[in-house]
Image: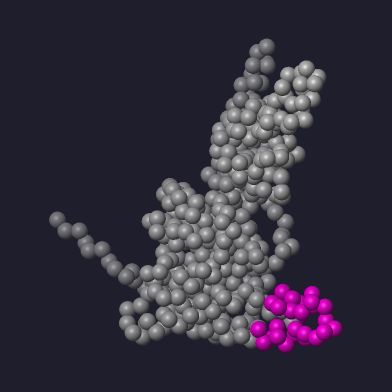
Amino acid sequence: MEALTVVLVLVVAAAGLLRWRRPAWYWLVFGAAFAIGRVMVNYTSVMDACRLTVPPSRWRLALARIANRPVPESRAPRILRLRPTRTGLVLRLKLRPGQDAFDVSAATDRLRHSFAMYGVTSRELRSGVVELRMTGYDVLKRVHMPSMKPDPAPMRVPVALREDGSVHYRDYRSVPHGLTLGATESGKSVFQRNLVVGLAPLDVALVGIDCKQGVELFPLARRFSALADNPDAALDLLEALVIHMGDVYQLIRAEQRITVNIPDAEIASDIWDLPDHLRPVPIVVLVDEVAELALFASKDEEKRRDRIITALVRLAQLGRAAGIYLEICGQRFGSELGKGITMLRAQLTGRTAHRVNDESSANMAFGDIAPDAVLAAIQIPTETPGIAVTGDSSGGWARIRAPHTSLRQAVNICNRYADRTPDVPALAPFRPVVGSLAPASEPLSKAAPATA
């Protein structure tokens, strides 16, 4: 008896330690089994309490009367599959006639409480089939990206973890351009580093515009094909990209060979329809702080600003087929930045907002595509940097968090894949010169000596 007690104490202590230090391990060893038991035992009563049941059909009622049997109970959605994952459970349901996927989505918070789970999200897979993803713990508290094989799809990189435990991908083929907002110390720079780290091993040219004198992107210079650290250089770089885009379209036009004898599938309309030996390298343009490109203090700066915004709008409207993708980042993005800004925002399909300083900033990100996400964005607490809300033009949104990647880690990865940096002739004048900087001879300011 004493030995059994000792074993039970050790098991409970180990479970408590795992739950504190390694919640994923605790979930796989203990939590998943308990959760499956709760779901299977309480499923019918929970669905009835959450008003997700339908009354028995007329023929069942008639059969019960004829056989003099009790009235059949209401029926809950049928369970098609229940499987554990490293973060929770996936429950696939077949809806009964008369039920709607919106009913399940509206009841997710009640299901979370009833099944004693940390979170529940719902999505419709096809007509009449709904999938519930239930998380057993706060997966965004300490983000650990699962080990994954290289994605065979081009231009698709994992950058963060969603609150339902799934991986959030940045897919440039389906969402060509994106906007990332966030206040100071909100995790926006870390999110951008994860994008660079994910793109570094791919056959892609990285172009950076960092008007903070390059403090964010220039340490990663070995993997960049072009960099600009001031608005004047940014203007020249963007106009060079516009010219390059025109050359790519001429190449696509020359390779279309449109005749009545060529099947439609062989007619090229973008770079991905071209043969591998002719396909230009895709380009991802990262703008670290877009407001620095839109602000001006004189007439000359205003003319430069108008040319910069015009070039950005052209790249956003026409760049996808030419393999040019935009990642616009900033603390603030709105109509107060001047004409052309709202036109640019309309082309940025992917939206990500970290903690923002005011509600109007969240409205700038989601007000036109997912109004429900505005409230979620302004509720991000200050003590959890990296938490963000992401959405797109489909109206769906989710909370995500990117794993913390230090600047040193990002630099090491960029140096490792420096040999994959392509040479784009149009961007050759803007290729960063990698060398060692001499340390500052003296500090910019000196503290005055203390006097009695």
Residue at left offset 64%, top offset 47%? 123
Residue at left offset 53%, top offset 73%? 208
The front one of 176 and 143 is 176
Q: Is residue 452 left or right of residue 152?
A: left
The front one of 186 and 79 is 79
What colour scheme has been applied to the protein in the rendered image? one colour
Residue farthest to the right, as pictured? 261
Q: Position of residue 209 (x, y in %)?
A: 49, 74
Q: Position of residue 160 (x, y in %)?
A: 58, 54
Residue 185's image quarter?
bottom left
Residue 257 lies in magenta, yes or no?
A: yes
Q: Position of residue 141 (x, y in %)?
A: 53, 44
The number of numbered badges drawn on the structure is 0
Q: Position of residue 139 (x, y in %)?
A: 58, 44
Residue 431 versus residue 330 in the image, above or below: below
Quadrant where the N terminus lies?
Answer: top right
Residue 312 versus residue 18 in the image, above or below: below
Q: Which residues are magenta?
A: 249-277
Q: Is residue 436 left or right of residue 335?
A: right
Residue at left offset 68%, top offset 79%? 280
Quadrant where the C terminus lies?
Answer: bottom left
**Is residue 88 in view from this perspective?**
yes
The front one of 323 and 63 is 63
Residue 169 versus residue 273 in the image, above or below: above
